Amino acid sequence: MSTTNNDTPAVAAAPAAPPSRKPPTDSTEQQSQQQSASHRDGRSGRGGRGQGASRGRGVNTNGKRNKNMGRNEYNRHQDDNGRKRPRTDWKPLEGVDDADREERKPKRKVAVMISYCGSGYKGMQLNPPFKSIEGDLFEAFVQAGAISRANSDDPKKSSFVRCARTDKGVHAAGNVVSLKLIVEDPEIVPKINAALPEQIRVWDIIRTTGSFSCYQLCDSRKYEYLVPSHVFLPPHPGSFLAKACLKYAKQEDDLEGYLSRQKEVEDWWTTVNDKVIQQLGDEARPVIEKVMAEEEKPVDKQEDTEPNEAIEGEKDGEKDGEDSLARKVREIYMQEKRAYRISPERLERVREAFRQFVGTNNYYNFTIDKTFKDPSAKRHIRSFEVNDPFVISSTEWLSIHVHGQSFMMHQIRKMVGLAMMVVRSGCVPSRITEAFGPRKIAVGKAPALGLLLEHPLFTHYNEKISKGFDREPLDFEKYKDDIDAFKQKFIYSKIYDQEERENTFTAFVQYLDCYRSPTYLYLTSAGFKVLDEAAAKSGGKLPAPKEEPDNESDEETMIGTEEG
């Protein structure tokens, strides 16, 4: 006859007790179960870790904490009075009938191959209450039955991991998320796409190894940045930056070098201003200088001006003839910029500037919340290439491709912004490498509009791991035709159309041109010496620069500094 409790089954059968013996007490029963458990585990009841109640991980019979048990583990087993905490049995959710409970289906670790247009989203990563790519994607998984309702309240329950986190407004021609999904349904991909907006597409769901993480196993990432070629024109001669560049070139005895770096565009603004006078008459001469002082103050940046008032003012027409003339000057400037075609010499200067980033460097000046001594600020750039120009809707564009292991928040946009300003201001390319040093400087952040993630690469996984476990490799090449069509319809077209309507890139560069502070004057021939002189005059510290137009992204700072 076995000795058992009423609540639990017998651990092991005990020999029948003689009639003369008393029934076993609770303590002897507990010892019998512990001893039989030790024999069941393959350990003897004498000595070492197999001494049942007196040794091993547990509480001794005298109530004292076993020396092999950690403090936190011991406390978890005790109630407020020091007694052993009773076991709490699992209970089903209240208010859910048996008929309403979902059938448990097997989940598989998978990689989801996706593309998306970032317009209208506050970035890739979940960031409630803001709209995000991950939010819509996870919702579609639930609606399609790839994630059960029991796991629909938290992506962590499905081991959700993204390969690359993109900023607000940034697009992805190819990105990957890895998680556990229910993928028995052969129509699961069409069902997910039916629950998604058109600007987010799932191309495939690929089974992976059980421990796969698309973030950890990604070898590198490729990004593309599209930019109009006219942003590499020099600042208007009447702007603050242009005047400072000429002043310091003379002061530092670098006038000849400065003019040689602007040789291929030295007459561009003179020719354009002549066209303005020719079309608008001599009365436009005094307006040209004024335009550069006021031209790129976007409506949302003007002080003491309500946006609605500014819009109404534009609809009703300018209040006086001078303002109307200034508006016409701006229109001619934009027409001429769109008609600009970059020369081979200027294009080579652009390529030379971007080549300065190749290699391993410290990019703490190109992100947020990093110090120079932070090891994570060092990143490796494998290549930075500028393709030949192409024309869309009368505007010439350059496609810039960067390939790196990983990138921090804003890093790519700041790299593009600095290279852009170095070329425009006639600065030496070596100023870019100087920005990798310990001196803290402000770097203009180029608009998010032109940035898109091309795709991540999983070279090691494809060559070693996937083959060893008979898994399909992760490669976007097989979806190339579909992705190219998606890019043309939802990414490239939106970039071109938005620039045509809003002149986003022009607003960015001319904001820096007219920024009346020494902050960006390290782009002149005097270099960082200008910042030292300005800091000495202002008490040792320069004021923090204001955010560039169309680049506000305060919500991004709440969700980390890793971009991809």
Image (cartoon, rainbow, N blue to C red):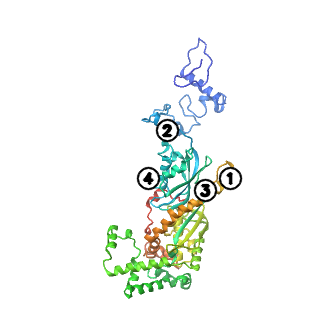
* Tags 3 and 4 touching, CB below 8 Å: no
Q: Which residue is mark 1?
A: 464
Q: Amino acid at mark 4?
A: Pro
Residue 130 vs 14, above or below: the answer is: below
Q: Within 10 angstroms of label 3, few (less than 14), some, or many (20 or more) residues?
A: many
Which of the two labelled residues, at mark 3 and mark 2, occupies the earlier sequence position?
A: 2
Residue 139 vs 115, above or below: the answer is: above
**Which residue is found at the position 54% from the left and 76% from the top?**
423
Residue 228 vs 170, above or below: the answer is: below
Which of the two labelled residues, at mark 4 and mark 2, occupies the earlier sequence position?
A: 2
Q: Which residue is mark 3?
A: 218
Which of the two labelled residues, at mark 2 and mark 1, occupies the earlier sequence position?
A: 2
Q: Amino acid at mark 2?
A: Glu
Q: Within 10 angstroms of label 2, few (less than 14), some, or many (20 or more) residues?
A: few
Gap in angstroms between the C-alphas marked 1 and 3: 13 Å
Element type where label 1 sits in the image: helix
Gap in angstroms between the C-alphas marked 3 and 2: 35 Å
Q: Which residue is mark 2?
A: 102
Q: Residue furthest bottom?
A: 282
Which of the two labelled residues, at mark 1 and mark 3, occupies the earlier sequence position?
A: 3
State the mark number for residue 128. 4
> Which of labels 2 and 1 is toward the front?
2
* Tags 2 and 1 touching, CB below 8 Å: no
**Which residue is found at the position 42% from the left and 35% from the top?**
95
Gap in angstroms between the C-alphas marked 3 and 4: 27 Å
Element type where label 2 sits in the image: loop
- Of residues 252 and 175, the one nearer the viewer is 175
Residue 212 vs 512, above or below: the answer is: above
